[in-house]
Image (cartoon, rainbow, N blue to C red):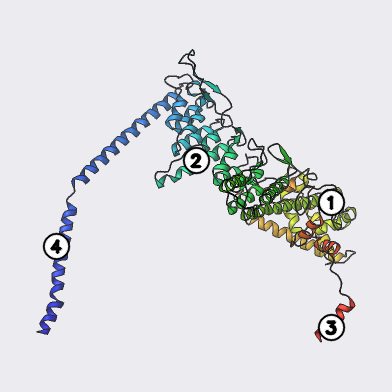
Amino acid sequence: MCKDVEVFSGDEPKKVIEKLMKKSQSKNIKQSMKPSRDMMYQDQEDSLIDAKEQMKQEKLSRIMATITLLLADGADPRIIRCPQPPLFMAAVAGCPDLVQDLVKHGADVNEVYPQAYEYSALDIAVSAPVSYENLSVIRALLECGANPDHRLKIPETASPSPTAPSATSPEIIDAGPTLLHAVLSKKIDIADPDDTHLFEIRDKMIELLLKHGCNPITQYNGVSAVDLAMNKCLDLFDIFVKSPRTDLNAIINDLNQTILVKMFYLPFCKSIPLTERLQTLTNLLLYGADPLLKCQNGIEEYGNLFVFARKMLSDVETTRKSVNPAAVKKSKSDAKTKKDKKDAPSKHGLLKTSDDNQGDYKQALELVVDCARLLYIRWLQAKLMKELIDIVNKYRHRSWNMIIKEHKNKKCTGLWLTVVRSLEIWDVLKTSKKKLYNDEKILKQVLCIIHFYYKRTRKIIRIPLTFQDKEIIDREVATLIHEHKLATISTPDMVPAIRPYVAPELTVKGIEKFNVCFECALPLQDSKIICGSCKLIDFCSVDCIARNIERINCHPCSSFLKHKYFPTPEPTVTDTAEDSENKT
């Protein structure tokens, strides 16, 4: 009995399950072979849509072929005005190929249309909704010579008057927004997640307008396109920063602010997270924003950006100290009044900031100070090298060890320059049009002299220079030049930057601009402290010297300044005796 139960429970259920599976599979196959009515209707609708779309495309192709044939047979697109000019209709229809054909056969790409607020074809294309077709039309118009650097004309509605006729045409104001203003002001509603590509299309429109000459500094209602992009999104602003058409040191709004001044203007500065702020400041400084130029905020003028930023910090400190936190609240009305006073902005638009905001502000300021110091060093090194190049060129018929006698700044050059850094400076100087900076013989002589100064300053070789030392220097310099060329040749596929990086080495009139403290970058007054070793840099106070000598590899004369202004006291006889007794 048990065996029968085991056999029944083991084999019979398997057979039943297999039969059920076969029945269900056959049923599914039969059901799948029977098309439903919905599917049949859907297929019919899709086929109808495809047929209509195909007929539409064929019709458009025939129209396009007819227009092309008429143009080839001599039809003048400038004569037709009914119902609209051909280029106008091509821009509205979003046909870039037709736009190119019309312009090729004589259509004026910059013609304005009085019936459309005196807009041009490019203005009409920019005012259309964001799409790939619209982007193609804008690109075609710009490539055909459309002028993007103009201001849109806006209609001014006349004030209603009972005596005025009802059909009066509105007046046209010339000082309207630019095309960049129009693109930045477009509202892009993302109802579908697949529509995020519209932002990329808008960015491409901005890049095209900038590339073909639309001025991003032109103001409309006191706001330029750059200022509008800063207020809207830092990703948009980054497009302007990297464009060579953008003057990063120009005034961008009716407050007479430059980009850097606005970045340190407290109401705007607090609205940006610290990480994004530091990255944006780094990009600005790399692409040519100069913190050492004179600047403005409203009607107040400042010697450079750092004077303005420290004025902001001092105003914040004054505001914080003026508020007494230990004041006793007498009543609810008094508390409310104090709260209103506490939140009220000052004359600079300041609010009482927290310690974190102040710390972030100081960190961003420190970054810009470090970059300004680096610009100072690069300009100073290039200045020393240019002086040496002029002397070598003057006495180029001599050997480099004989030219040394004519050079005066031997110690300074040995302190501030190396062969590797000199090769970097030479690459920058070669970008200028002077033939002097493309002479390989002069380069080798200059590098040999710099390498000799470097070794002599660090007491690697002795004076007078021997023939063996000269041969060693020649070989080492030749090796360094060869390695530098190999490093340049080994990266031929590197894509050059759209906008060249800042090059202080090419600054001609830098003496006035770099007349600042080497540590804090504030403009120098009459009372300044000159470095007694190199006599090339200045400090505004002993405190700045104390901070600067703690920076690693910042100033080659740091040890000299430390011994001069902060000497370590030598141990006396009694101190040494006490130390020996303690050891025993």
Q: Secondary structure at mark 1?
A: loop
The residue singled out by tag 3 in the image is: 580
The residue singled out by tag 2 in the image is: 202
- Please give left or right for residue 424 compared with residue 191 in the image: right
Closer to the camera: disc 4 or disc 3? 3
Determine which of the numbered discs, if any, sits on residue 240 in the image: none
How far apart marks 1 and 4 lie (CA) works out to 101 Å
Mark 4, other Cα within 10 Å: few <14 / some 14–19 / many ≥20: few
Mark 3, other Cα within 10 Å: few <14 / some 14–19 / many ≥20: few
How far apart marks 2 and 3 lie (CA) works out to 78 Å
Q: Is residue 256 visible?
A: yes
Residue nearer the viewer, 48 or 127: 127
- Considering every residue shown, the one lying at the far bottom of the view is 584
- Considering every residue shown, the one lying at the far top of the view is 163
Q: Is residue 111 visible?
A: no
- Please give left or right for residue 551 compared with residue 164 in the image: right
The residue singled out by tag 1 in the image is: 528
Residue nearer the viewer, 30 or 12: 12
- Say whether marks 4 and 3 touch (CB < 8 Å): no
Q: Earlier in the sequence, mark 2 or mark 3?
A: 2
How far apart marks 4 and 2 lie (CA) works out to 59 Å
How far apart marks 1 and 2 lie (CA) works out to 52 Å
- Considering every residue shown, the one lying at the far front of the view is 330
Classify the position of the C terminus by image quarter.
bottom right
Q: Say above or below: 514 vs 148.
A: below
Q: Say above or below: 160 vs 466.
A: above
The residue singled out by tag 4 in the image is: 23
Closer to the camera: disc 1 or disc 2? 1
Q: Earlier in the sequence, mark 1 or mark 2?
A: 2
